[in-house]
């Protein structure tokens, strides 16, 4: 059963690029043709603006990774603050 699930997951993941490339030749909505002006941008803003203009999939991946990293940093800082106050974060349990 586990092998069947693995094979199905692999087939789905390998089939996604084929589905995306099958849409070539169709009309692109105006919202997807928008670009960001690069004038006056430097550093990280320029990096994200170029990624947005060049490849929306890569931009979405960068944003998702950035959100995950920021969330982990916030959780780590919160854990440090709570342990400094005297709360044991590991001891918190939820009762349902």
Image (tube, rainbow, N blue to C red):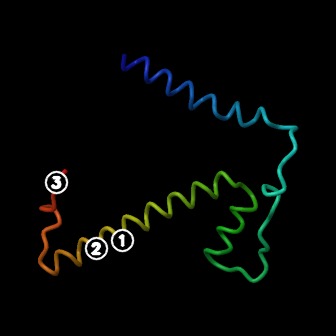
Whole-number angstrom distance, CA of label 3 to CA of label 1: 24 Å
Secondary structure under tag 2 reads helix
Q: Quadrant of the N terminus?
A: top left
Whole-number angstrom distance, CA of label 3 to CA of label 2: 22 Å
Determine which residue is flagged by label 2.
78
Identify the image quadrant of residue 91: bottom left
Whether residues under marks 3 and 1 lie with C-beta atoms below 8 angstroms apart, the answer is: no
Whether residues under marks 3 and 2 lie with C-beta atoms below 8 angstroms apart, the answer is: no
Tell me: residue 53, above or below residue 8: below
Determine which residue is flagged by label 1.
74
Secondary structure under tag 1 reads helix
Tell me: residue 34, above or below residue 3: below
Q: Earlier in the sequence, mark 3 or mark 1?
A: 1
* Mark 3 vs mark 2: in front: 3
- Tell me residue 24's x, y (percent): 83, 37
Point out which mark residue 95 bears.
3
Whether residues under marks 2 and 1 lie with C-beta atoms below 8 angstroms apart, the answer is: yes
Identify the image quadrant of residue 31: bottom right
- Tell me residue 50's x, y (percent): 72, 66
């Amino acid at each position: 059963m586990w092998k069947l699930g693995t094979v199905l997951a692999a087939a789905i993941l390998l089939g996604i690029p084929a589905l995306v490339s099958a849409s070539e030749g169709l009309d692109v909505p105006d919202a997807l043709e928008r670009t960001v002006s690069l004038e006056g941008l430097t550093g990280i803003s320029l990096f994200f603006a170029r990624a947005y203009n060049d490849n929306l999939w890569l931009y979405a991946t960068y944003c998702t990774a950035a959100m995950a990293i920021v969330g982990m940093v916030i959780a780590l800082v919160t854990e440090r603050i709570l342990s400094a106050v005297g709360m044991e974060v590991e001891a918190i349990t939820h009762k349902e």
